Amino acid sequence: MSDKIKELVLKIVIVLGCLFGILFIVLPFFSLFFPYDPDLEVPFPQPIYTLWITDMILFFSCGGLIVVLTIVFKIKPQPVKAEKMPLAFEDYNSLLDFIQNSIILNGYKRQQVIPFISNGAVIVFVRPSGLWKLDCIALVRVNELTDEILDKANKAITKSLCGYYGKETITDTISMITIVCVNRITPTFQKLVNSNIEQGFKNFRLPVGISFGGKQIYIAKQKDGFAITKYKKLRKEFLNIMHIQEQKIKAKKK
């Protein structure tokens, strides 16, 4: 059985489980349409009670089946190719001048530059977007991206945010666009932009890669799942910052 069929089966079971869960909550309200009987031995009229119990069994069965299928199928995450578009800047300095002005004009404030490796730095821009919410754009500049450098860059971004809040623990909801600029594409860079994005509960993110060697912009994609709407908003924000029009992207695809 192919991974696509396994994934389809798992999604069907998940959808059924959600439907049974909704019915489990909704079914008791149908008892309001039946006349009240003080002699009832069950909490609802017998037809509703029978359906409710059956639905409860099906709901928990789906939950157990999801766990079993996840273990048995061992579905490997498939690479999701990044959205590509040409880069209009020859080097990092020209990009920095443009994008920094654009970000600030959109209400972001630049934080202190953090050098985290030799010939590498992180610039973080922040913008409060509501009660306990923060929009963030992190600009990472390295020659080549490795797993170790990516880990250090993430720690530098966290350090900058902790400096902004003045504390080590951040409880606000963070919406993060991370723009990684490199001279040459490496396996770590490819993995960053070609992996399906998984969003957190209070931390939303959009990884973007820029290669000056290939003169390309790579926007990571999110296939579906949790916070897909937030992903689309982050993508739209990046395009707005870069002054890239959606109509032109659609025209090129055609």
Image (tube, rainbow, N blue to C red):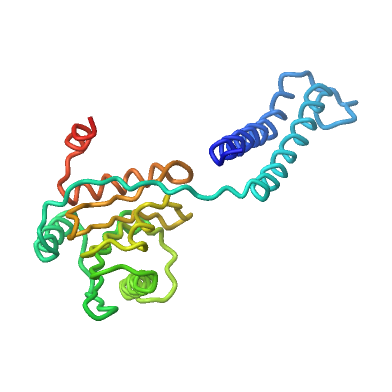
- The residue located at (26%, 67%) in the rendering is 140
- The residue located at (25%, 71%) in the rendering is 122
* Horizontal and vertical percent position of residue 19: 63, 32
In-image side of 151 versus 63 (left or right): left
Residue at the limit of the structure toward the bottom, as seen here: 118
* Horizontal and vertical percent position of residue 7: 56, 39
Q: Quadrant of residue 14?
A: top right
Does residue 139 sit above or below 71 in this rendering? Answer: below
- The residue located at (17%, 36%) in the rendering is 248
* Horizontal and vertical percent position of residue 165: 34, 71
184, 203: nearer the viewer? 184
Does residue 124 sit above or below 42 in this rendering? Answer: below
In-image side of 168 versus 9 (left or right): left
77, 241: nearer the viewer? 77
Does residue 168 sit above or below 6 in this rendering? Answer: below
In-image side of 137 versus 41 (left or right): left
4, 114: nearer the viewer? 4
Q: How many marks?
A: 0
Specify the quadrant that holds the C terminus. top left
Q: Quadrant of residue 9?
A: top right
* Horizontal and vertical percent position of residue 193: 34, 54
- The residue located at (31%, 72%) in the rendering is 164
In-image side of 54 versus 92 (left or right): right
Specify the quadrant that holds the N terminus. top right
